[in-house]
């Protein structure tokens, strides 16, 4: 891993998978790609829902982008708020096949890796910022054992030697969970929340830089 640059933040999402014909994280990442927040350009990357390949592409994107921070988004179809993940576990264990048909069982993400790796995003500051905007959010200790956790663990394992780059994973609920007939559409709320997540990460990075 190389030292971070000062002009970009890497934001990733996933393609559609399983029963979900549309993945809101893909839409959000594409919408925010190229947007500038506090002189920092968002670089959006959509990852495949494929064990191994998704992690490899993410690490390649980090190496190529040399970002100031890395924020990975994933869809959690059964959750009802934005889940700020705190811990990635060294385990691939799939209930459903990935988009390439792979369905690992009790396999390590990295054979020589530790049992778990912590997020280095300012999750409590992000939680406060989201709640200030009235956006449902919570801290979470489990990103599952599917491809979301796979890329989360790969990311944190690879960045162990580069502590200057805060990074982590955030699960988003389906947009319809947040929708209200008389207010903002769910996808708009999730996009606004993602901007707040980026802004808070950059503020905290500057405060502790």
Image (cartoon, grey):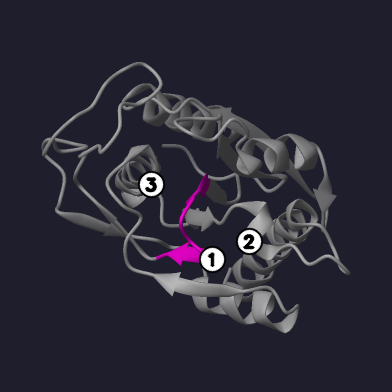
Relative to 158, is 52 above or below?
Answer: above
What kind of element bears circle 3? helix
Rate crowding at label 2 as few (under 14), some (14 to 19) or many (20 or more) other CA atoms within 10 Å: some
Q: CA distance from mark 1 to mark 2?
A: 6 Å
- In the depicted view, which residue is nearer to us: 158 or 147? 147
Number of dots carrying numbers:
3
Rate crowding at label 1 as few (under 14), some (14 to 19) or many (20 or more) other CA atoms within 10 Å: some
- In the depicted view, which residue is nearer to us: 70 or 76? 76
Question: Where's residue 195, x and y in %?
Answer: 74, 58
On the rendered image, what quadrant is the C terminus found in? bottom right
Question: Where's residue 45, x and y in %?
Answer: 61, 31
Relative to 52, is 146 above or below?
Answer: below
Q: CA distance from mark 2 to mark 3?
A: 24 Å
Residue 80 disc label: 1
Relative to 95, is 99 above or below?
Answer: above
Horizontally, residue 158 falls left or right of residue 80, namely left
Contact, mark 1 vs mark 2 (Cβ under 8 Å): yes
Q: Residue at x 60, y 66 (%)?
A: 205
Mark 2 vs mark 3: give the one in front: 2
Q: Residue at x 80, y 37 (%)?
A: 34
Question: Where's residue 120, x and y in %?
Answer: 43, 63
In the figure, residue 101 lies in which quadrant?
Answer: top left
Q: Is residue 77 magenta?
A: yes
What residue is disc 2 on?
A: 177
What residue is disc 3 on?
A: 152
Question: Magenta span covers which residues?
Answer: 74-85
């Amino acid at each position: 891993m190389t030292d971070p640059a000062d002009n970009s933040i890497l934001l990733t999402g996933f393609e559609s998978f399983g029963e979900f014909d549309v993945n809101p994280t893909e839409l959000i990442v594409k919408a925010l790609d190229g947007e500038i927040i506090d002189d920092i350009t968002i670089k959006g990357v959509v990852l495949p829902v494929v064990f191994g390949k998704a992690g490899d592409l993410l690490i390649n994107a980090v190496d190529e982008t040399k970002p100031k921070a890395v924020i990975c988004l994933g869809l959690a179809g059964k959750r009802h708020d934005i889940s700020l993940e705190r811990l990635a576990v060294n385990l691939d264990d799939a209930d459903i096949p990935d988009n390439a048909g792979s369905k690992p069982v009790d396999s390590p993400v990295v054979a020589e890796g530790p049992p778990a790796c912590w997020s280095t995003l300012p999750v409590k500051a992000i939680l406060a910022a989201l709640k200030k905007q009235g956006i449902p959010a919570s801290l979470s200790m489990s990103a599952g054992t599917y491809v979301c956790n796979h890329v989360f663990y790969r990311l944190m394992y690879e960045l162990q030697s580069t502590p200057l780059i805060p990074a982590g994973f955030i699960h988003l609920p389906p947009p319809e969970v947040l929708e209200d007939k008389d207010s903002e559409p769910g996808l708009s709320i999730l996009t606004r929340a993602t901007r707040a997540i980026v802004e808070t990460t950059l503020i905290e990075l500057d405060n502790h830089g």
